[in-house]
Image (cartoon, helix red, strand yellow):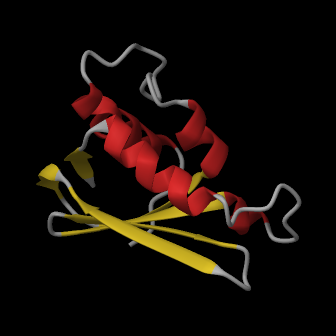
Amino acid sequence: MKFVVSSTELLSHLQAISRVINSKNSLQILDNFLLSLEGNTLTMTASDIETTLITSMEVQDVVGSGKVAVANKLLLDTSATSGTGRKCPSVKCFCACFVEWYIKNIFLYG
């Protein structure tokens, strides 16, 4: 699963659904965003069990598909750098850098 998206557009979608995430969740999985990639559509989901917010956006240069749960703070706090800690040369590389690194090193569902 690899794709390219504007980090500012991605963050606006993530911030819109992040308001449903509580700081004291009884289940750790609820501290994550669920990212689902099918075709050129990236769907992002956040939930507190009672309320679920879902948003989607078109992405570019898609390779593969799948689902991954990513810690909300990790995605929101790394808007300008990739998972490797290097500065992204443009806003369009954030997700390609970060998600590819994250999937290879942490979780892969799908």
Horizontal and vertical percent for residue 22? 79, 61
* Whether residue 30 is situated above or below residue 60 in the rendered picture: below
Is 19 left or right of 4, judged from the image as shown? Answer: right
Horizontal and vertical percent for residue 15? 54, 51
Is 47 left or right of 90, judged from the image as shown? Answer: right
Please say whether residue 103 is visible from this viewpoint.
Answer: no
Q: Identify the residue at horizontal 54%, vertical 47% (top origin).
A: 106
Q: Identify the residue at horizontal 42%, vertical 26% (top origin).
A: 82
Horizontal and vertical percent for residue 65? 25, 65
Tell me the quadrant of the picture where the N terminus can be found: bottom left
Please say whether residue 89 is visible from this viewpoint.
Answer: yes
Toward the left, the furthest residue is 61
Q: How many marks?
A: 0
Q: Identify the residue at horizontal 65%, vertical 42% (top origin).
A: 73
Q: Identify the residue at horizontal 62%, vertical 50% (top origin).
A: 72
Horizontal and vertical percent for residue 96? 28, 38
Q: Decide which of 43, 51 is in the foreground and name it.
A: 51
Tell me the quadrant of the picture where the C terminus can be found: bottom left
**Residue 32 found in image quarter:** bottom right
Is 82 left or right of 28, judged from the image as shown? Answer: left
